[in-house]
Image (cartoon, grey):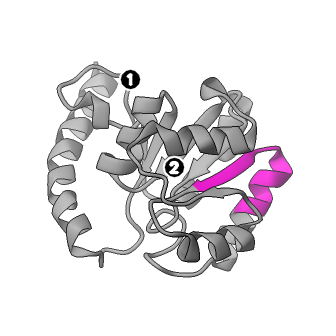
Amino acid sequence: MSEYSGGSLFGAFYPKKYMDSTYEIDFEELYQKGYRGILFDIDNTLVPHDAPATRQSVELFERLHAMGFATCLISNNKEPRVTPFAEAMNTPYVYKAGKPSRRGYQEGMEKMGTKLPDTLFVGDQLFTDVWGANRTGIYSILVKPMNPREEIQIVLKRYLEKIILFFYLRKCRKERNG
C-alpha cells in the first residue's frame, strides 16, 4: 500500500492511496475518518472484466451497507452490463458515466446523498477512474487490476500508467523516508 500527499508533474493522475486489491482496503478506518459514500468502478476493480457479481463482491457490499456506507457503481459500460451487476450488489449505479468527466462522479454522489468531503472512489485505471475522481475532488484509491487480460485500448493505456506509477511510487518512497 502506498499513500500520496500531492504535488508533481503527474499529480493529477496520482491516487491518494494505492492498494493491491479492493478487498484489502480498510473500510472501517475510512468510515472512522468520516467517509460515508463509496463510488466503485466494476471491471477489474470488483470482479475480473465482464464477470458477474461474485460472492466476495456481494459480501463486501453487504458489509459496507451494514457499516453505514452508501455505495454506487459508476461505469463507462452500457446499461446491459451495469444494471444486473448493480442489482446483485443492491446498489444504485451510473452507466455510460463518461469517466474522467466529473458528471458521473457527481451523479453518483447525488444518488448516495453524499458530498465531496465524505465520498471516496475505488477503481483500477489512472486515466479514467483516478483522474476523474481527482478532477471532481474525491479521495481516490487505485487498486491493481484483477485480471491482466484486457481489451486492446486498455492494454495500451496500461503502458502509460506504468510510467506514471513509477514516479508515483518513487515519490511515495521519498515521502516515507523523509
Q: Position of residue 6 (x, y in %)?
A: 33, 22
Please, what secondary structure does the residue beneath circle 1 have? loop
Q: What amino acid is at disc 1?
A: Ser
Q: Badge 2: few (under 14), some or many (20 or more) residues near its Cα, within 10 Å?
A: many
Residue located at (21% from left, 32% from top): 10
**Circle 2 residue:** 122
Residue located at (69% from left, 38% from top): 110
**Circle 1 residue:** 5
Q: Going by the image, does 161 lie left or right of 78?
A: left
Residue 153 lies in quadrant: bottom left
Residue 78, visible in the rendered structure: yes
Instruction: In the rendered view, tell whether residue 169 sits above or below residue 52.
Output: above
Q: Which residues are magenta?
A: 61-73
Q: Position of residue 61 (x, y in %)?
A: 72, 60
Magenta-drawn stretch contains 44 = no
Q: Badge 1: few (under 14), some or many (20 or more) residues near its Cα, within 10 Å?
A: few
Please, what secondary structure does the residue beneath circle 2 have? strand
Q: What amino acid is at disc 2?
A: Val
